[in-house]
Structures are given as structure tokens and as C-alpha cells.
């Protein structure tokens, strides 16, 4: 992808993206006004186009729906003409600027940003922006907000429409954050700016009637007494998951995620998903982490989807089918976890072959038969075999003793980029 280069006001570009706020033409600097006045084609949403005066005489083209697939054809249809694209606030912050940068070549794109609604909201609330987490629900399910809920954390939620504040309040109540303080800020930076009174998510819905569709929701997170506490690192309480016993338990799960070592933007295959806990916690490590879980049992597959939704990663892709056959049609991974089905013919080899150089594979088992397979794989490919044993203190009559869980054998390996090395490091 070629990055957008803002350039000086005099830069020549095929496409200029102009950020505009609720204050419309009056709030634009001279460079933005000049770009819009000189444009032969003006592309934007109907609301944005209506903010322009008659002096902007270019052909006005409203974005079609859905927007993203239409971008290449729309740019091609007006190639060779001076194009100005209108965007809300900062075009490179959850805006159309990203799509345009992906479709144009470097110097062909010029970006003239405007203060975003997030900047306006932080200024009105007196919240240092570096201490605030921003979550967008524009074109995304409200469930993704759940991953950001931590006691005392401040959130700014970008709304899809007038109904979003109500959805946010309902989700906060459902996830044990009903006491959270909520404030809705509308039409920020414009003449109709309105900042609502602070309420809590627990207050009746009738106190939060739908308002302006152009809004942002400010949340100061407060966890309800007795609500399950979910941390920011892998190893969530087992009680956080709906399961039928097929669950990688908390301590083993934390060790497994440490061996998988997720990094931003990476894709995990979770093979033999069970309850989906490994894939869920992989995705919770960073908003850009992706995962596909493969589970042959349809009932468990549905349960995985519910767990993902509940824990704030509704983007988890669940493939219902038996591995290795089900692996053939999914994108190649950066890392693979095998939590079940190791004895299925060809499964381990298929996962190994799918890994790129430098990819990681972690496999867990509690059976002797699968342990033998992992030992053989370790001899072929290198890596590390470890035995994970966890015991819990339990009552023994009037005393306390240890109850040992089944030990887990784990093989963790990096696929070597040097096939001549004979072993993976």
C-alpha cells in the first residue's frame, strides 16, 4: 500500500481529500477552500456536499452504497479531472482517506485534514487524548466495545447513527458495566453542537431518547460490584467462557498464548476450537489481530461465536468442518494452535506446510497417542516440548490438599526460514 502524502498547499495531485467538520465552509482553512473551489468533481456524502456554497461549481457526486467497493470505479470514471473528496473530520482517522490511499499512487493523493470529532470531544471533556481509547462502531458490531471495558478506563465511541448511544448503554449493562458514566456529544464543532448531561448506563432507556445521528459517546468505565473482572492479558477466568468441558484452562491458556506470541495484524488458525478461548484471547491482545477457528461440531461452533461476541471480538471467523480438509479454503496463517484432533491423518503436516517461514506452531495434548506424534514432530522440526502441570488446593476432610489436573504436553516451534539448517529455531 502506498502511503498518502499530504504535501504543501501548492502540491499537484489527482485526488485531494478535504476534511470538513459540522461547521461546514466557515470552518475550512484557505487551502481546503481553494481545493474545493478549483475541483472539477466533488465527491462526498449528501450531508457533506450540502455544506458547500454555490461557488464550488464542480460536478457533485454522492457516494453510492456500499461505499468501499465503489471507490476504484468512481475514481476511474473521473480520471484526468481535478477530484476533491469530502470527508468528515480527519480523513485518515477511520475515514475515506484509507480507501483512497489504497487505490492511488503516492503523490497522486493529497490530504487536507480537519479536527476530528475525537479531538473535539477530548477538548470539550478535558480528557488527555493519549489516555483515551477510541472505538468505532461505524459499520461494525457493538459487541467489539466489550474488549475495551476496564474499570476506570475512558472511551470515546464513534457512533454509526442516533441509535448507537442506546446500544452502547445496553451493552454496558449486559457486560457488568452498568454504573459507567455516559455522555453523548452531538454535532461537535458546528453551530448545533450539543453536549448531553452525564448519565449512567443503568438509567432507564427513556432518559436517553435518540438524538442527532452525528454523535460520539463518551464513557468512563465503572464495573458493577460482583461483575467478573477481565484483565488485559491472556488467561481470563474460565468462568468468562460458555463451554461443555472442552476448554483450554486458564493457566495452560496463558502459557499457550505466550508461546504463540501474537503481534499486531497477525492471523491465527485455532484448529479444534472447542470453546474458542485461544482464538478469543489472541484477538483481545490487539484490535488488529485476526483469528480463524476450525471446529467440526456445529454446536461447539455456535458456542465459539457466542463467546467471541461476549468477550468483544465478534470478528472471529468460525469455520465449521473437520481438519485438515477444512483448512484448504482459508488464508495462510502467521501462527497455528492445535488444540484437538492431532491424530487426524495429515492434520499436523497440513498445518506445518501452511505456515510461512518464521511462523509459529503450538500444539497441546493430554493423551499418550498424541504426545507420541508431538515427540516425533519435535525430532523432525525442532522446537521445544514441555509438560505443563497445574494443581489446585481443595478441601480434604478438615484439611487442604492438592488436586492435580491432567498434565498437558505442549510442542512449540518456529518454522525456520533456512530449510538447510535441519532444525527450527
Image: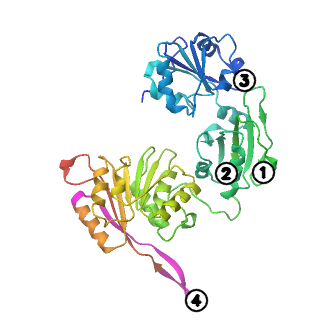
Crowding at mark 2 (Cα within 10 Å: few <14, some 14-19, many 20+) = few
**Magenta segment, principal secondary structure?**
strand
Q: Position of residue 188 (x, y in %)?
A: 72, 31
C-alpha gap between disc 2 and disc 4: 41 Å
* Residue that mark 4 sits on: 398
* Residue that mark 1 sits on: 205
Crowding at mark 1 (Cα within 10 Å: few <14, some 14-19, many 20+) = some
Badge 1 or badge 4: first in the primary sequence: 1
Q: Nearer the viewer, mark 1 or mark 2?
A: 1
Q: Secondary structure at mark 2?
A: loop
In the rendered structure, the answer to whether residue 408 lies left or right of residue 148 reads left
C-alpha gap between disc 1 and disc 3: 30 Å
C-alpha gap between disc 1 and disc 2: 23 Å
- CB of mark 1 within 8 Å of CB of mark 3? no
Residue 150 belongs to the span the image colors magenta: no
The structure residue drawn at horizontal position 69% and vertical position 12%, both measured from the top left corner, is 54
Badge 1 or badge 3: first in the primary sequence: 3
Residue 400 belongs to the span the image colors magenta: yes
* Residue that mark 3 sits on: 23
Crowding at mark 4 (Cα within 10 Å: few <14, some 14-19, many 20+) = few
What residue span does the magenta drawing correspond to?
380-402
- CB of mark 1 within 8 Å of CB of mark 4? no
Decide if residue 137 is in sight here.
yes
* Residue that mark 2 sits on: 152
In the rendered structure, the answer to whether residue 3 lies left or right of residue 85 reads left
Q: Secondary structure at mark 1?
A: helix
Crowding at mark 3 (Cα within 10 Å: few <14, some 14-19, many 20+) = some
C-alpha gap between disc 1 and disc 4: 51 Å
Q: Is residue 189 above or below residue 207?
A: above
Amino acid at each position: 500500500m502506498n502511503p498518502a502524502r499530504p504535501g504543501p498547499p501548492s502540491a499537484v495531485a489527482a485526488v485531494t481529500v478535504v476534511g470538513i467538520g459540522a461547521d461546514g465552509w466557515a470552518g475550512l482553512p484557505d487551502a481546503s477552500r481553494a481545493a474545493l473551489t478549483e475541483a472539477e468533481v466533488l465527491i462526498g456524502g449528501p450531508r457533506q456536499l450540502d455544506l458547500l456554497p454555490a461557488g464550488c461549481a464542480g460536478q457533485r457526486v454522492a457516494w453510492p452504497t456500499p461505499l468501499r467497493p465503489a471507490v476504484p470505479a468512481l475514481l476511474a470514471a473521473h480520471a484526468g479531472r481535478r477530484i476533491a473528496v469530502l470527508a468528515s473530520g480527519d480523513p485518515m482517522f477511520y475515514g475515506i482517506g484509507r480507501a483512497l490511499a489504497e487505490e492511488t499512487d503516492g503523490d497522486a493523493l493529497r490530504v487536507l485534514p480537519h479536527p476530528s470529532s475525537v479531538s473535539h470531544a477530548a477538548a470539550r471533556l478535558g480528557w488527555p487524548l493519549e489516555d483515551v481509547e477510541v472505538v468505532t462502531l461505524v459499520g461494525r458490531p457493538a459487541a467489539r466495545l466489550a474488549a475495551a471495558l476496564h474499570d476506570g478506563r475512558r472511551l470515546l465511541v464513534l457512533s454509526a447513527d442516533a441509535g448507537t448511544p442506546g446500544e452502547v448503554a445496553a451493552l454496558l449493562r449486559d457486560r457488568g458495566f452498568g454504573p459507567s458514566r455516559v455522555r453523548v456529544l452531538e454535532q461537535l464543532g458546528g453551530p448545533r453542537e450539543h453536549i448531553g448531561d452525564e448519565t449512567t448506563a443503568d438509567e432507564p432507556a427513556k432518559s436517553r431518547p435518540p438524538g442527532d445521528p452525528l454523535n460520539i459517546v463518551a464513557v468512563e468505565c465503572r464495573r458493577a460490584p460482583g461483575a467478573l473482572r477481565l484483565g488485559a492479558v491472556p488467561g481470563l477466568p474460565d468462568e468468562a467462557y460458555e463451554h461443555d468441558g472442552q476448554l483450554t484452562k486458564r493457566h495452560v491458556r496463558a502459557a499457550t498464548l505466550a508461546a504463540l506470541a501474537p503481534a499486531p495484524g497477525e492471523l491465527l488458525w485455532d484448529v479444534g476450537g472447542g470453546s474458542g478461548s485461544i482464538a478469543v484471547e489472541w484477538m483481545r491482545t490487539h484490535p488488529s489481530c485476526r483469528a480463524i477457528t476450525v471446529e467440526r461440531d456445529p454446536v461447539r461452533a455456535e458456542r465459539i461465536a457466542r463467546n467471541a461476541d461476549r468477550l468483544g471480538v465478534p470478528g472471529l471467523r468460525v469455520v465449521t468442518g473437520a481438519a485438515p480438509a477444512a483448512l484448504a479454503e482459508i488464508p495462510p496463517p502467521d501462527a497455528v494452535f492445535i488444540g484437538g484432533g492431532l491424530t487426524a491423518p495429515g492434520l499436523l503436516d497440513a498445518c506445518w506446510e501452511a505456515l510461512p517461514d518464521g511462523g509459529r506452531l503450538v500444539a497441546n495434548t493430554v493423551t499418550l497417542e498424541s504426545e507420541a506424534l508431538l515427540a516425533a514432530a519435535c525430532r523432525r522440526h525442532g522446537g521445544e516440548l514441555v509438560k505443563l502441570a497445574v494443581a489446585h488446593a481443595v478441601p480434604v476432610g478438615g484439611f487442604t490438599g492438592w488436586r492435580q489436573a491432567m498434565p498437558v504436553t505442549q510442542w512449540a516451534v518456529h518454522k525456520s526460514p533456512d530449510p538447510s539448517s535441519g532444525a527450527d529455531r
